[in-house]
């Protein structure tokens, strides 16, 4: 698997909606003063900081050194560490684990859930939102089509995003000892700011798919994908991403 190499400046400037929309998930977490909470895939630390403002003791982990570096600069009072979501452990247990817009990047979903379970106290909560079934379906379909037409079928293997249904993900959680307390799958077509289009989205979130392809050819392919998506992901001269989200809460039993 080719790893994502996140552009933190692009993320904060043009894709801040990712963590801003995640603020709504914090109500489901309902963190309280004195609780210990882990922010799994904390990115640049925006939501981690909001959890801290609730009075909880929070720390953030992310596999991207660049994201963690930025989080530490922004919020020096909070502990941030570089850790892999499929292989992490702590000496002390948490009251809750929170994750926003992260788990769809990790095909090894059972490894993640196992780590989450092991780091929670008995009765601890796991609250997450991420891409659900058919998330960015138009974009993924277009990427595959353009790559195949242009002789890069091998690169379609890098489209390893994980977008489960409620039933699929709930079953895995139950397998590892969680009790699902709420689950919601919903549409969230998200319009991007003026001057931001699907090319920016591809450069931010799909860069690894073009691994091994020259920069000039990558730019050409991305332009072709943009043209292909203009009929499905553009409305009133504004680009939108066809997100479908899965928001789920569970308790360790």
Image (tube, helix red, strand yellow):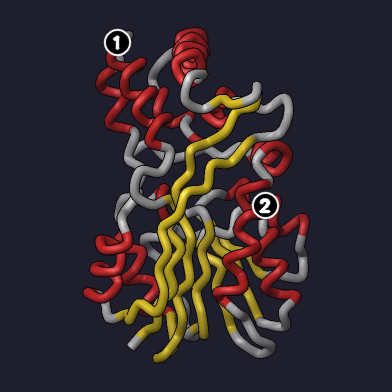
Q: Give the camera-side residue of 42 and 167.
A: 167
Residue 215 can be seen, yes or no: no
Q: Relative to residue 174, is residue 73 drawn left or right?
A: right
As helix, strand or loop, the secondary structure at mark 1 comes to helix
Quarter in which the N terminus is drawn:
top left
The answer to which image quadrant residue 39 occupies is bottom right
**Whether residue 132 can be seen here:** yes
Q: Position of residue 48 (x, y in %)?
A: 65, 66
Residue with the mark numbered 2: 69
Q: Which residue is mark 1?
A: 149
Q: Residue at x 43, y 82 (%)?
A: 120
- Residue 226, relative to residue 190: is it above or below? above
Q: Residue at x 27, y 31 (%)?
A: 157
Quarter of the figure with the C terminus: bottom left
Residue at image location 52% in from the left, 69% down from the top: 98
In front here: 106 or 82? 106
Residue 99, image x and y in percent? 51, 64
Element type at mark 2: helix
The x and y percentages for residue 140 are: 37, 31
Q: State whether residue 248 is above or below residue 13.
A: below
């Amino acid at each position: 698997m080719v790893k994502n190499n996140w552009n933190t400046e692009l993320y904060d400037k043009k894709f801040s909606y990712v963590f801003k929309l995640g603020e709504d998930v914090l109500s489901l977490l309902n963190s309280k003063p004195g609780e210990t909470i882990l922010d799994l895939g904390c990115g640049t630390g925006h939501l981690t900081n909001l959890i801290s403002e609730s009075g909880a003791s929070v720390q953030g982990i992310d596999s991207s050194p660049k994201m963690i570096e930025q989080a530490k600069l922004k919020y020096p009072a909070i502990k941030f560490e570089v850790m892999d979501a499929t292989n992490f452990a702590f000496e002390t247990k948490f009251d809750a684990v929170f994750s926003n817009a992260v788990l769809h990047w990790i095909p090894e979903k059972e490894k993640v859930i196992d780590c989450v379970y092991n780091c929670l106290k008995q009765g601890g909560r796991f609250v997450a939102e991420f891409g659900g079934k058919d998330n960015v379906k138009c974009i993924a379909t277009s990427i595959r089509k353009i790559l195949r037409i242009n002789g890069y079928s091998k690169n379609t293997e890098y489209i390893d995003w994980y977008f489960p249904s409620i039933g699929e993900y709930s079953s895995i959680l139950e397998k590892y000892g969680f009790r699902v307390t709420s689950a919601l799958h919903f549409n969230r077509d998200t319009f991007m700011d003026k001057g931001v289009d699907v090319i920016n989205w591809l450069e931010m979130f799909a860069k690894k798919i073009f691994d091994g392809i020259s920069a000039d050819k990558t730019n050409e392919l991305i332009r072709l994908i943009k043209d292909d998506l203009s009929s499905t992901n553009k409305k009133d001269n504004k680009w939108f991403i066809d997100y479908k989200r899965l928001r789920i809460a569970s308790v360790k039993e």
